[in-house]
Amino acid sequence: MKIFNKNTLLLTILLSMQTLSILIYTTYAFVHEGNNLFSIFIDNMLSLNWNGQFNLDFSCYLTLSGLWIMWRNKFDLSAIIFGMIAMILGILVFAPYLLYLLAIEKGNLKNVLIGNN
């Protein structure tokens, strides 16, 4: 990927590190805790404590990121499906998608954010 400026390089490094770290963490958690993420996530929210507050806040961010993906891609069927997957998998999908956009938009952050409308 051709990097055009320092900000784009830093963003690329950050997104790459986030993707790798959450992939490693998720794999470790899955191996040691199993696949009961959603029941734990919901139980925490229903407990009305700080874990639940964090999960609710995080869910709001996930929803916004998924809706942004859908909006940027004009709400066609593939965008809706991809946005919903991003809402569930979070940064495992969102960061690589941003890296992909940075590559195809040649580092133009305006085009990354709003597309070629």
Image (cartoon, helix red, strand yellow):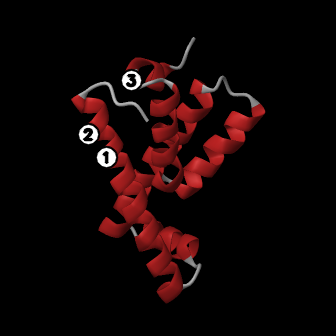
Res 33 visible: yes
Mark nearer the viewer, 1 or 3: 1
Outermost residue toward the right in this view: 77
Query: Mark 2 = which residue?
Result: 10
Q: In which quarter of the image is the C terminus?
A: top right
Q: Are marks 1 and 2 in contact (CB under 8 Å)?
A: yes
Quarter of the rendering containing residue 66: top right
Q: Which amino acid does label 3 sit on?
A: Leu
Using the image, tell me which numbered label, if any, was put on residue 13: 1
Q: Is residue 9 above or below residue 34?
A: above
Upstream in the sequence, badge 2 or badge 3? 2
Q: Residue at x 53, y 28 (%)?
A: 104
Outermost residue to the top:
117
Badge 1 or badge 3: first in the primary sequence:
1
- For label 2, the crowd category at 10 Å Cα-Cα, with few meaning under 14, some 14 to 19 and many 20 or more, is few
The picture places residue 96, in percent across and down from the top left corner, at: 49, 47
Q: What residue type is labelled 2?
A: Leu
- The structure residue drawn at horizontal position 34% and vertical position 30%, both measured from the top left corner, is 3
Q: Which amino acid does label 1 sit on?
A: Ile
Element type at mark 2: helix
Residue holding disc 3: 109
Label 1: state its secondary structure.
helix
- Which residue is painted at 49% across and 75% down in the image? 27
Residue 94's spot in the image, x, y percent?
49, 46
- How packed is label 1: few (under 14 Cα within 10 Å), some, or many (20 or more)? few
Q: Farthest residue toward the front?
A: 2
Which class describes the residues within 10 Å of circle 3: few (<14), some (14-19), or many (20+)? some
